[in-house]
Amino acid sequence: MEPRIQNGFLRAIIFMPIWFVTLALFMTLTSVLLMFASGVDMADENAVQALFDMSFDSPIMFS
């Protein structure tokens, strides 16, 4: 079976944005699930902001 797009470089250019969007969605969903699993209060703005800080004292880190 022949690929519809013969040029490999063009296939990569089409595939990469799809991959990045999928990866970003997966990482966001995983982060939110980790926040729920670790008991982070989603109403607390500081706790939600800690999601983007990514430090070891973040409330999403398991103890």
Image (cartoon, grey):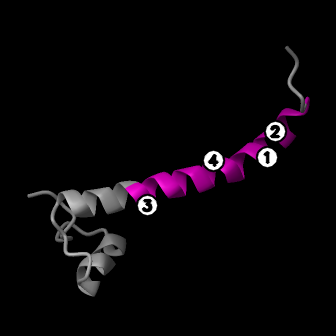
Where residue 56 sits: x, y (%)? Answer: 20, 66
Disc sitting over residue 19 in the figure: 4
Contact (CB < 8 A) between labels 1 and 2? Answer: yes
Please state which amino acid type lies under the numbered disc 3.
Thr
According to the picture, the residue beneath numbered tag 2 turns out to be 11
Q: Are marks 2 and 4 in contact (CB under 8 Å)?
A: no
Residue 37 as seen in the image, left or right of residue 6: left
Residue furthest to the top: 1
- Eyeballing the image, is 49 above or below 57? below
Q: Position of residue 4 (x, y in %)?
A: 89, 29
Q: Is label 1 in a helix, a strand or a loop? A: helix
Can you say which quadrant of the picture contains the C terminus?
bottom left
The total of numbered circles placed on residues is 4
In-front residue for pair 22/41: 41
Mark 4 or mark 1: whose residue is earlier in sequence: 1
Between disc 1 and disc 3, whose residue precedes?
1
Single out the mark in the foreground, 1 or 3: 3
Q: Residue at the spot x=63%, y=47% of the render? A: 19
